[in-house]
Image (cartoon, coloured by chain):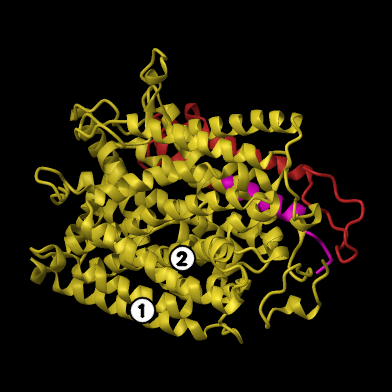
Chain colours: A red, B yellow
Amino acid sequence: MAAPEPEAPTTARSRAKDHSPWNWLLFIPIVVPLIPAFFNADSPRLFGFPRFYWLQLAWILLGVGTTTLVYQMTKKRGDR
Amino acid sequence: MWRDHLTEIIVFSLLFLLVSAMGFVAARWRAPRDMAHLDEWGLGGRSFGGWITWFLVGGDLYTAYTFVAVPALIFGAGAAGFFAVPYTIVIYPLVFLVLCRLWSVSHRHGFVTPADFVRNRFDSPILALLVAITGIVATMPYIALQLVGIEAVLKTMGVTGDSALARHLPIIIAFAILAAYTYQSGLRAPALIAFVKDSLIYIVILVAVIYLPYKLGGWGDIFDAADAKFKASPAPGDGILLNANNQLQYVTLAFGSALALFLYPHSITGVLASRNRDVIKRNMSALPAYSLLLGLIALLGYMAIAANVKPLPGAKAGSVDGNTVVPLLFDSQFPDWFAGVAYAAIGIGALVPAAIMSIAAANLFTRNIYKEYLKRDASPAQEANVSKITSLVVKVGAVACIVFLDPQFSIDLQLIGGVIILQTLPAVALGLYTRWFHRTALIAGWVAGMGLGMWMLYQVGNPATGKKHFAGSAFPLSEFGFDTKKTIYVGIVAVLVNLAVAALLTLVLRAAKVADGVDGTTPDDYFADEGDPRVTPGPDRDADSAREPVA
């Protein structure tokens, strides 16, 4: 990714761009749901669901939680 | 016989008429001063807030076909069909930052399509044309597939005829109405209808996942019934868990599909119609609600097994139409009136994505073929007009696909569609981050990825159905000479080769100092937000045009 242009248009407000260490967290919900070793088994069952199904549905919460956290932590504050 | 399904047909028709009326009224909803501009007709004025975007993009990505085909896959093959869940989980963190950059640069420059961006970024009309054609070709069978969803419902209600025309008449009428209100209201029509569609689907599925397990003896029994069915079947790949040979396929298919989804023109249309970057980011957190819905819908396939559903016969003698399992499950378990509501949810569910897809394909044609090659000085009003007419043509084409060809052909084409749209990844998605790739190298990479992808898909046969070619996207690694039974998703291999060719050739072309055009964007463009000045002025009512563009 290119560095910010030195002579950016004067109208461009100085802002946090998209660089934030919090963004690295986004890798967790990308990598974890793609590892079959975690979920490819029948036991333990939860409400009758084999682990394969309830755990993969639970990854949805992981995804929502992570994206929400990253959004909250990288949100621009006080300039709108 | 259709007479046995009279209540269902009446409820279905009433709800269908209701949303059709909404489609026409939508032109007045958040009415612009001047509809004769592509930003208004094709992107709803780029003004949608969080809620509308959530319904619009959700209604756009989770299509009627998904709701019918994913449970059908689970019904037939078991765990392998559940890939749709990890697929729709990894997608949002994957595109969380990418789409914001695309939104910003498109807002700044008035881009309507991904090909507009490529044209400007890489200064290459040919690369843009390739991206546009890839998008149109990948989208067309997707629209046709929405009809397969409606058709499965009509078939279950007994609305069929002896001649080809009588059988397809309801679909032709439905699409004529859809075409008319899309022509009039543009993206506002699906945005408004999406509210009804998604509310209906949420209600139906909530009822289904609570009521059906209660009727069928609980979730444990449902999974056990499915397990028993797969243990008894001779096919090696099925089961309620994955086996050693299809895990790689499962993971690569989920990941590859996730990479492909937001390259589809219709997904990008939904994103560009949102008001600002915040709306996109909040939606990336909220859209997984649909993934939960999709996961539960997928399990309807197992409920159909537990309820002993036998799919209706397919188009050819001896074959079965797996897509009818969910409608049949509703028919056998729900009271008639509620089955009618459920059918309407699937039917209307087909209209929203079909409308957005035809708008997206029409925008690609207008911006990247008509304006680029046929009429350079087209005014905004002419652009909007050409797009409206093209959206009609696209729908006629989709209906023709279903009426004159075997629906299986559309399903095969859609499979190919996922592989080919992935080949635009280096230019569109990586292009948002880096201008390092040489434009000629990107074209060569596209050609290599496309060629390899087609060859691999051609090799995939299915002994069970007797199909020799294009029978799936699981490519046996033994074809490459590996001593294994594992399979892998074709799209991933093709896009990796595409990237490798593009990267190597970039090094060569840079060393040879071949001209590489001028980048029409600046780094700051990728962070622009609502209220920032545009390089290209928007339509009159746009707040931004008050502060005139810089450039």
Residue B528 quadrant: bottom right
B173 to the left or right of B43: left
Q: Position of residue A18 (x, y in %)?
A: 77, 50
Q: Position of residue B57 (x, y in %)?
A: 51, 62
Position of the C terminus of chain B by quadrant: bottom right
| Predominant secondary structure, magenta span | helix
**Residue under the image location 33 percent in, 36 percent down:** B472
**Residue under the image location 43 percent in, 77 percent down:** B183
**Residue under the image location 63 percent in, 73 percent down:** B47
**Residue under the image location 39 percent in, 12 percent down:** B483
B316 to the left or right of B535: left
Q: Pinpoint the chain carrying mark 1.
A: B
Q: Please provide the residue range marked out in magenta.
A: A61-80
Q: Note whether B49 is above or below B207 in the view shown.
A: below
Please tell me which of labels 1 and 2 falls first in the chain: 1
Q: Position of residue B405 (x, y in %)?
A: 23, 53
Q: Note whether B137 is above or below B537 in the view shown.
A: above
Q: Note whether B60 is above or below B379 in the view shown.
A: above
Q: Nearer the viewer, residue A60 or A46?
A: A60
Residue denoted by label 2: B356
